[in-house]
Amino acid sequence: MARSALLNVMVQAALKAGKSLSRDFGEVQNLQVSVKGPGDFVSQADFRAEKIVREELLKSRPTYGFLGEEGEEIKGTDGAHRWIVDPLDGTTNFLHGIPQFAVSIALERNGEIVAGVVFNPATDELYTAEKGGGAFLNDRRIRVGARKVLSDCVIGCGMPHLGRGQHGKFLVELRHVMGEVSGVRRIGAAALDLAYVAAGRFDGFWEAQLNAWDIAAGILLIKEAGGFVSDMKGGQDMFENGTVLAGNEYIRKALEEVVNRPVPHA
Ligand code: IPD
Ligand code: CA
Ligand code: CA
Ligand code: CA
């Protein structure tokens, strides 16, 4: 598997931030944590990891823009390129000692994601993709699942936490999906959820109220693994409306229908 120089820069940044996260994960009870809003936390580990990724990426490409979850967006002088970074996706898991979290780094070129890296330092799983070059888990090529009917499928989801609305809407979606599939899972880290779809671990996934940094790298992983990614209505406005629906092409229509099925009248 040959990686481009740019992808190598992204991988090195993810590995370095991953080391910092692993150290902090071992000392999680000593971390300073602040509250962004109800049920929404950020810790020293998030800030440290973002600093490492930002410095590594901008050292290598000083003119690119940088959008990270925990800092002010940096507008680059190169208007065509932007890094989109979640330094710690799955902060709630992390703070609870649950080893399901990741660094997510994507490179956008003229509005299109052209490279993506998702790294879970707790499991040492590194997902990478470049446009047109396929998707990989460590050195192994990955593809989305091949199950053709929803009743055989395991579908991942994300649910709104305290402080986010739309709990009722999500419960309707969940009830409809649960009635059609073999299992539903909730990992708690959207970047990993999408990587799981790319690796065929999940057959599909849906979630609303996401940000670009949660999904940018994962979107490319799935496309390069042969799957589909859309917003929940089937369009391509994932960043604009913050929703994602993903899976393999066989189940696309069925998953889209069940997630959007209207509430039955009483
Ligand atoms: C969160 C995780 C979670 C998702 C939330 C995200 P964070 O990201 O991806 O799975 O349900 O919507 O905000 O805050 O841990 O980086
Ligand atoms: Ca967060
Ligand atoms: Ca996130
Ligand atoms: Ca985060």
Image (tube, helix red, strand yellow):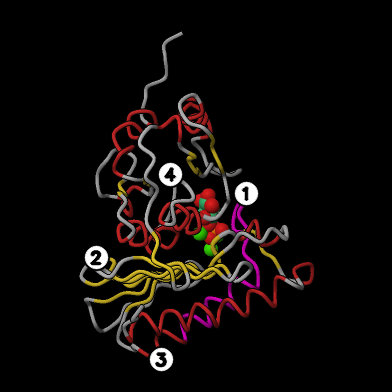
Secondary structure of the residue carrying numbered label 1: loop
Instruction: Tell me the distance, in whole angstroms, between the alpha carbons under discs 3 and 2.
Output: 22 Å
- Does label 3 or label 1 sit earlier along the sequence? 1
Q: Give the labeled residue for mark 4.
A: 203
Structural crowding at the residue carrying mark 4, measured as other residues with C-alpha within 10 Å and reported as few (<14), some (14–19) or many (≥20): many
Structural crowding at the residue carrying mark 1, measured as other residues with C-alpha within 10 Å and reported as few (<14), some (14–19) or many (≥20): few
Vertical position of residue 266 compared to residue 225: above or below: above
Q: Quadrant location of residue 254?
A: top left
In percent of the image, x 38 and y 49: which residue is there? Answer: 242
Structural crowding at the residue carrying mark 3, measured as other residues with C-alpha within 10 Å and reported as few (<14), some (14–19) or many (≥20): few
What's under tag 1, amino acid-wise? Pro
**Is the C-beta separation of discs 4 and 3 under 8 Å?**
no
In percent of the image, x 29 and y 66: which residue is there? Answer: 113
Q: Give the labeled residue for mark 2.
A: 112
Secondary structure of the residue carrying numbered label 4: loop
Which quadrant of the rendered structure holds the N terminus? bottom left
- Does label 3 or label 2 sit earlier along the sequence? 3
Which circle marks residue 38 in the picture? Answer: 1
**Is the C-beta separation of discs 1 and 2 under 8 Å?**
no
Query: Is 178 or 82 nearer to us in this picture?
Result: 178
In percent of the image, x 34 and y 40: which residue is there? Answer: 232
Q: Give the labeled residue for mark 3.
A: 59
What's under tag 3, amino acid-wise? Lys
Bounds of the magenta segment: 36-55
What's under tag 2, amino acid-wise? Glu
Structural crowding at the residue carrying mark 2, measured as other residues with C-alpha within 10 Å and reported as few (<14), some (14–19) or many (≥20): some
Q: Quadrant location of residue 80?
A: bottom left
Secondary structure of the residue carrying numbered label 2: strand
**Is the C-beta separation of discs 3 and 2 under 8 Å?**
no
Q: Quadrant location of residue 49?
A: bottom right
Please state the horizontal and vertical placement of residue 161, each as a whole percent of the image: 58, 44
